[in-house]
């Protein structure tokens, strides 16, 4: 391997300074670091791979106090809009990564050095280790070394001959495609470390070898060989697997989007992130362990915050799944300055735990479910506080106390939301209930989450488990250890996130679920899509059921609204039609989850206007899908149709005049069809319809197809509801008009009820007749939908949230006039939250108002006027 040197690789003068102070220990090269990964009882903990897109550690230098600092080029060389400077930064990133790659290869070589003689002596009469032990300890090290050696040798000349045309994306793409070797290494890691420890205890010769391995330093470094333990070196591939992902984030930051490297680096990042997600799911259960008083290893497999129904009320609990028991705890209140502690509420041995359904004699406790509008109102309050916090920070007045006060208030409201949102029951039973309650009930927000808990428990129950009964002292020791062993430290609320953490995506995610394969038997199959919002996951869309097949071809497109979302989950189900298989918790037939998977929503990957194709692998099943993201400003931007003969994108006055009607035909027909067979549909207007069906209906209405009534009667009702929403969204001007937008904003803000009434009614009178009559028709329809809220779960507030941003929004002229400041910020998540609240409030005001008659509006005397 040719070493990297400053002689062969010319750099900017400040880069030389940077690398002369390079702190390699920040990249995980400290040989003592492995000791920190031991728990206090000496048991091995499984490392967790960090996927956060932070600055690559390869670019960390050492400050005067020894702390890592980020390199900052001198004035004039800061990367900005200048492409040439951006590419210089890209070269810097690559140079740093190549330097760390050289060190990594030297570490792998240090591991391979004893492997060869140990293998050679294994077949002699006096072996140090058996051939099986050698293969276990050094599993896949040779393959990993060869992959990185080839990568280094290929990358090195590209940096030597650097110019703006050099491409390296294909090299990272190839490296990412070989990550399967790391999968095998990670699966074997714990066994390798345990085998090395046992062999060290049993053989002093091997112990001497494993505690003193020599690693060559970089050729240009003043450091000579360093001595590292085998355990520390075995951890290096675990640590290194995330470094390529981190550097890809940095490279993309400094690569122009039109550079040939950009799509290649994006693809490499996608492969790496998906790999890390799958690896983390598998290594999480092996992260932490504790030794029992009997000397047995009790390992923490999974933990998280769940809502328990206890004495008919909701309680937020921290649940810990160990290898032999499930423990439910709550955080004890402690005085300021004292360490927090858990209090055990109950525990259940896995040997006694079952998921069997209730007997007829068992009583299912009443589950308190709040009206949906209360949940939505809390979301609005949280959005308003988020906006206030952003304003406080921008003001730069140093009022940290005020920010902390707002954060505390937001934490309380988000915690309330997490407590009251979940509705999916997860019941566990105790088949040996002499001393404990017979069953426990949790509420979850996601079927994905419920499936994860169930599968984790069932996987452990396949082992030969013996019932365990803890003494009070043993229980106290175990509960105390939970604080150190926990992997989930805070409830998933915004106020617990760092300021520099990504806020997630706000806008619309378009997803096409193409197909799936890998099923062994024919079944009735469908998929659901979940995204995270406000700290928990919500089901957003569902494909049709594809009957009796092993290779379903759905090819269905959905539009999903994102509210700070960071992750998309896909669950694949087998539809069950057997009415004998009712779930007594929710009185619904239980469909079988065939597989599930998730993908991170990376803004850099999704910001392209093009479709991004991906595959999620789940239990041997592969689901193929495509997605693209549209920000709020683009999704709601209104572009008049060039074809004035249609109805979409055409002024409502033009359409009603042509049709000689008071309300457009499309509005009347969609409302009629929804009221005929969709008014009882759960989530009507909230659940996404299939985009291809919506486009088919759009084309039919635009061309005035004769068969439109037949199409409507055959079409899925959610597609019809989606067509109506799309019609209003694509109007060249919002239904409540650009002209009246500022007046609506002022009117809804009035405090005096009488003044607000007169103003809001006057504004309706000011609308053009086609707009007013159509709006009143829609209002009465939505009220009829809300009357069925106990069945369809759609309250007035829900409907206001769905239609508000579609019917009312500022025009571009309003933005440029200065009615709304910072045009570039209008669709940022904090400003958008406040504006959206007002839109919803306007529509909700009219929805909650007694019936409004067009004739009466026109007849009434004007008591209050406003300049519109």
Image: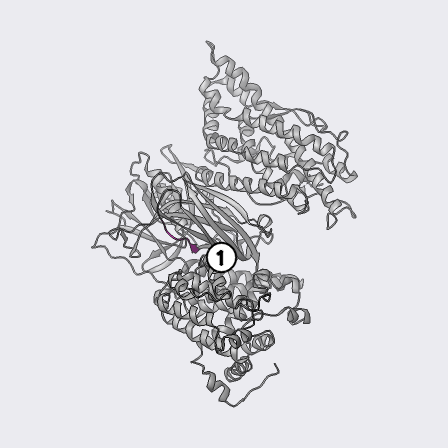
Label 1 belongs to which residue? 560
Residue placed furthest toward the front: 706
Dividing the image into 4 quarters, which one contains the N terminus? top right
Answer whether residue 542 is magenta in the image: yes
Total marks placed = 1
Q: Which coloring applies here?
A: one colour
Q: Is residue 324 visible?
A: no
Name the spot of residue 93 as percent of width and height, x first. 68, 39
Is the residue 620 above or below the residue 750 in the image? above
Answer whether residue 785 is magenta in the image: no
Left or right: where 457 falls relative to 757:
left
Left or right: where 833 falls relative to 415:
right
Location of residue 229 by image quarter: top right
Q: Nearer the viewer, residue 628 or 368?
A: 628
The boundaries of the magenta stretch are: 539-546
Q: Is residue 793 visible?
A: yes
Q: Secondary structure at mark 1?
A: strand
Mark 1 residue crowding within 10 angstroms, few (<14) / some (14–19) / many (20+): many
Dividing the image into 4 quarters, which one contains the C terminus? bottom right
Residue placed furthest toward the bottom: 861
Q: Nearer the viewer, residue 751 or 271?
A: 271
Name the spot of residue 756 as percent of width and height, x first. 52, 81
Name the spot of residue 399 as percent of width and height, x first. 63, 63
Q: Nearer the viewer, residue 454 or 699?
A: 699
Is the residue 5 above or below the residue 732 in the image? above
The residue shown at (32%, 38%) is 461
Left or right: where 323 falls relative to 2:
left
Q: Nearer the viewer, residue 774 or 575?
A: 774
Residue placed furthest toward the left: 361
The rendered magenta stretch, by its main secondary structure, is classed as: strand
């Amino acid at each position: 391997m040719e070493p990297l040197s400053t002689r062969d690789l010319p750099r900017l003068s400040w880069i030389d300074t940077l690398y002369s102070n390079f702190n390699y220990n920040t990249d995980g090269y400290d040989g003592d670091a492995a000791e920190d990964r031991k728990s206090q009882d000496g048991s091995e903990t499984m490392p967790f791979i960090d996927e956060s897109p932070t600055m690559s550690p390869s670019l960390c230098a050492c400050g005067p106090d020894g702390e890592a600092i980020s390199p900052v080029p001198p004035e004039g060389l800061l990367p900005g809009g200048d492409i040439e400077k951006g590419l210089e930064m890209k070269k810097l990133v690559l140079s740093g990564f190549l330097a760390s790659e050289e060190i990594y290869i030297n570490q792998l070589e240090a591991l391979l050095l004893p492997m060869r003689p140990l293998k050679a002596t294994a077949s002699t009469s006096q072996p140090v280790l058996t051939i099986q032990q050698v293969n276990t300890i050094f599993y896949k090290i040779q393959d990993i070394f060869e992959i990185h050696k080839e990568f280094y040798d290929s990358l090195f000349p590209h940096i030597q001959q650097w110019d703006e045309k050099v491409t390296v994306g294909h090299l990272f793409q190839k490296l990412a495609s070989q990550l399967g070797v790391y999968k095998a290494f990670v699966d074997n890691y714990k066994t390798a470390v345990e085998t090395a420890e046992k062999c060290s205890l049993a053989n002093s010769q091997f112990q001497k070898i494993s505690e003193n391995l020599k690693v060559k330093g970089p050729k240009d470094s003043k450091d000579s060989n360093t001595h590292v333990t085998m355990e520390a070196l075995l951890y290096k591939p675990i640590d290194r697997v995330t470094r390529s992902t981190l550097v890809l984030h940095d490279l993309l930051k400094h690569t122009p989007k039109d550079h040939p490297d950009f799509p290649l680096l994006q693809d490499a990042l996608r492969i790496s992130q998906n790999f890390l997600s799958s690896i983390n799911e598998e290594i999480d259960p092996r992260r932490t362990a504790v030794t029992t008083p009997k000397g047995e290893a009790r390992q923490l497999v999974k933990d998280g915050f769940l809502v328990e129904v206890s004495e008919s009320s909701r309680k937020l609990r921290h649940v810990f799944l160990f290898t032999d028991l499930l423990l439910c705890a709550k955080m004890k209140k402690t005085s300021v300055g004292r360490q927090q502690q858990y209090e055990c509420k109950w525990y259940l041995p896995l040997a006694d735990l079952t998921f069997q359904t209730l007997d007829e004699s068992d009583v299912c406790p009443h589950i308190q479910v709040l009206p949906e509008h209360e949940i939505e109102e809390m979301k609005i309050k949280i959005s308003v506080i988020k906006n206030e916090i952003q304003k406080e920070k921008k003001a730069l007045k140093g009022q940290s106390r005020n920010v902390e006060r707002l954060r505390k208030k937001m934490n309380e409201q988000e915690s309330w939301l997490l407590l009251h949102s979940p509705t999916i029951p997860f019941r566990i039973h105790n088949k040996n209930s002499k001393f404990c309650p017979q069953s426990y009930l949790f509420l979850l927000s996601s079927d994905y989450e419920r499936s994860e808990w169930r599968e984790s428990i069932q996987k452990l129950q396949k082992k030969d488990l013996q019932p365990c009964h803890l003494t009070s002292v043993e229980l106290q020791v175990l509960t105390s250890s939970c604080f150190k062993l926990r992997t989930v430290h805070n409830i998933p609320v915004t106020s617990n996130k760092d300021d520099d953490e990504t806020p997630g995506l706000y806008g619309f995610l378009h997803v096409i679920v193409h197909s799936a394969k890998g099923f062994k038997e024919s079944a009735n199959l469908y998929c659901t899509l979940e995204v995270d919002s406000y700290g928990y996951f919500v089901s957003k869309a569902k494909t049709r059921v594809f009957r009796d097949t092993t290779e379903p071809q759905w090819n269905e497109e959905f539009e999903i609204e994102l509210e700070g979302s960071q992750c998309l989950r896909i669950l694949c189900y087998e539809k069950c039609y057997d009415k004998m298989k009712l779930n007594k918790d929710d009185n619904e037939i239980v469909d079988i989850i065939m597989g599930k998977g998730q993908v991170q929503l990376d803004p850099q990957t999704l910001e392209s206007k093009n479709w991004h194709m991906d595959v999620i692998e789940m239990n041997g099943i592969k689901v193929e899908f495509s997605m693209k993201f549209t920000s709020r400003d683009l999704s709601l931007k209104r572009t008049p149709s060039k074809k004035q003969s249609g109805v979409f994108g055409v002024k409502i006055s033009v359409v009603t005049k042509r049709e000689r009607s008071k309300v457009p035909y499309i509005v009347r027909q969609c409302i009629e069809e929804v009221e005929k067979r969709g008014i009882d549909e759960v989530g009507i207007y909230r659940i996404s319809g299939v985009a291809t069906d919506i486009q088919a209906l759009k084309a039919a209405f635009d061309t005035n197809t004769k068969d439109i009534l037949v199409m409507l009667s055959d079409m899925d009702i959610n597609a019809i509801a989606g067509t109506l929403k799309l019609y209003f969204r694509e109007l060249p001007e919002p239904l409540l008009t650009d002209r009246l937008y500022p007046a609506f904003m002022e009117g809804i803000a009035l405090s005096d009820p009488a003044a607000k009434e007169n103003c809001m009614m006057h504004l309706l009178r000011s609308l053009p007749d086609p707009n007013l009559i159509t709006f009143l028709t829609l209002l009465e329809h939505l009220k009829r939908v809300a009357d069925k809220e106990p069945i369809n779960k759609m309250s007035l507030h829900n409907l206001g949230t769905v239609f508000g941003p579609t019917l009312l929004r500022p025009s571009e002229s309003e933005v440029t006039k200065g009615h709304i400041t910072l045009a570039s910020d209008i669709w940022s998540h904090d400003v958008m939250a406040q504006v959206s609240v007002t839109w919803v409030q306007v529509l909700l005001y009219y929805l909650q108002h007694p019936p409004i008659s067009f004739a009466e509006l026109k007849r009434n005397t004007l008591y209050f006027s406003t300049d519109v």
